[in-house]
Amino acid sequence: MTVPFNKAHSPDIMIERVLVGKTSQAMPEAFFPDRLNPHFSQPESRRQLQTAIDWGRYAELFAYDERSQQLDLG
């Protein structure tokens, strides 16, 4: 049985929603692995987060500053 894709559960959409909900529209990268851990193993959470950051940046959903490790709606 195939489970239908729900974009609301996509890590990049989750990141964007968190950022939209913050007054500063920014959060440290370290905030997000705990949000993914209930759904994935710890190594898979890290991989999912990195993929979400890459795709979110590509789609211009949010920005990521590698030096400060901050995600924002920039």
Image (tube, rainbow, N blue to C red):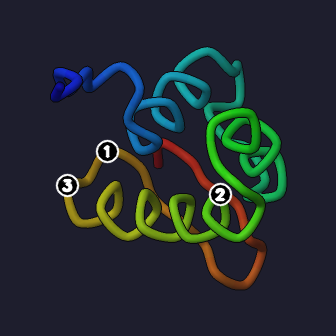
Residue sitting at 26 percent across and 26 percent down? 7
Determine whether label 1 and label 3 are within 8 Å by CB.
yes
Determine whether label 2 and label 1 are within 8 Å by CB.
no
Give the number of the disc on residue 59. Answer: 3
Relative to residue 42, is residue 7 depicted above or below?
above
Tell me the distance, in whole angstroms, between the alpha carbons under discs 1 and 3: 5 Å
Residues 13 and 9: in front is 9
The x and y percentages for residue 23 are 70, 19
Residue for badge 1: 61
Tell me the distance, in whole angstroms, between the alpha carbons under discs 2 and 1: 20 Å
Residue sitting at 23 percent across and 24 percent down? 3
Residue for badge 2: 45
Q: Residue furthest front?
A: 1
Quarter of the rendering containing residue 27: top right
Is residue 42 rendered to the left or right of residue 1? right
Tell me the distance, in whole angstroms, between the alpha carbons under discs 2 and 3: 20 Å
The x and y percentages for residue 67 are 73, 84
Residue sitting at 46 percent across and 42 percent down? 11
Quarter of the rendering containing residue 44: bottom right
